[in-house]
Amino acid sequence: MDLLSSFYLCLRSQNYIMVYTFNPFTNYAPHPWKEVEVTNKPDPRWTSYNLRLTQDNDMCRLLQFDKSKLLNGYPVRISAYANISFQLHSTILRFTIPKINDYTWTPNALKRIDNNIENAIPSYDELRFAIATKSRYIISTFIEIDSVIDPYTSIFAISILLLIITLIALVNEYQFLAAIVDVYRHGSTFTYSKISYAHYLYLSVYIFGFVFSPVLQGQVFALLTKPSYRNIETLQDLYDYNYHVYYDTNIHDNIMDAGLWTTDDDQKYLHRIDDPFSLECFELARHHSSFAFKCELYVSKGLIFPTNYVRFSRKDWALNDRVGQRVLHTTKAGIFNYLKREQLDNKLKRMKAIEKASELENYNLIDESNLIAMSRRRSKDY
């Protein structure tokens, strides 16, 4: 950048001064700049120009011109890194961006841009994260209790319950209990104290309790006291159910700012992933709900941690604005999303083709003898 904005003044005589400048992109300079013939140029595109400085009102206007206006196929060095660890990725970028490459195709989180050596291209992709977990089947407690009780025990327990209910109804309606107690008193010389209905009801329930074995009672009460399960929707759910959380390194600060995994014992459930898109299952599930259903994945309804990702270039790169405009136009046109969709759709097509091929292997081949037998059978039916 310093070379592009630098001018060198050389005094030729007392009458005029010669101004020299340098264009690294191509052999271009407006009139009245003239190319300087040199014997040794490191690159054919590197060209020096001079201009005779005279007393002219347009001299200041002529000194400044857009050297990147005509690039004439000037090569832009672009870097892209994939399927490597984040630490190595950062090391490569810190090494190549300021020294070797001009622009990187690999997006990075905006908050990680080092403004001292990098410059963000004004094309932002906002990424939001979802929580993908194994689907959990919600089973009612009644169904779980029914699964641990065999049919004979169920019939016997229901019969006793119906008998108790019937006895209670008869006692309340016809006063059978009072009559039985009265008859028993007349036949005995011993005086009984008054017995309430509640005592008999308690005795019936107490006897009913012995019908079930302690093991069966323990299973039933364990199911009744078991907390209800549901699919994971928030970070709080992950923390409450002690899930092991695998996440992109770029959102580690967001995870810690949530204030849930604060102790060392809690942080053993957190696992960073340098390249989260290496898991094809999750990459496909992000765009195709049918694939997520097939893999029995549950994706949370709410999205978390909105993060801006940008592509960036070398600090003070002269072509930053021009390349930024091209990238912005390409992004608005949807070419990036189209290419990514094409890649994902091709993967799904290959998977479907493999499934169809495996299904065809299960079919029995029909030869000529089978066809003849089938035709004879049909002729007999007619």
Image (cartoon, rainbow, N blue to C red):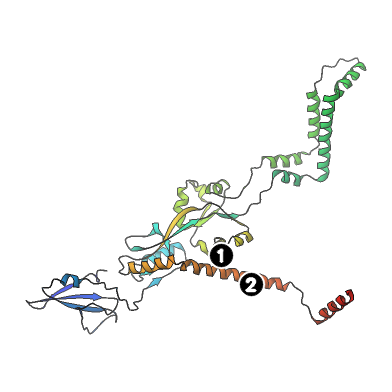
Residue at position x 80%, y 23% from top? 197
Q: Which mark is residue 353?
A: 2
- The image shows residue 152 at horizontal and vertical percentages of 83, 44
Q: Nearer the viewer, residue 151 or 191?
A: 151
Q: Is residue 348 left or right of residue 305?
A: right
Question: Disc 1 on helix, strand or loop?
Answer: helix
- Percent from the top left, x then y, of residue 147? 75, 47
Quarter the N terminus occupies:
bottom left
Left or right: where 281 falls relative to 157: left
Residue 105 shows in the view: no
In depth, the one of 314 and 29 nearer the eye is 29
In the image as oriented, which residue stretches furthest toward the bottom? 39
**Is 313 in front, or is 33?**
33
In the displayed structure image, the side of residue 11 where residue 182 appears, left or right: right
Query: Which numbered disc covers residue 62?
Result: none
Q: Amino acid at mark 1?
A: Glu
The quarter holding residue 108 reads bottom left
The residue drawn where x is 54% and y is 47% is: 239
Quadrant assignment for the C terminus: bottom right
Other-residue count near label 1 (Cα within 10 Å), few / some / many at <14 / 14–19 / ≥20: few
Q: Residues within 10 Å of mark 2 (few under 14, many from 20)?
A: few
> Mark 1 or mark 2, which is nearer to you?
2
246 w.r.t. 266: above or below: below
Q: Say whether residue 178 is visible.
A: yes
Residue under pointer 1? 280
Mark 1 touches mark 2? (CB < 8 Å):
no
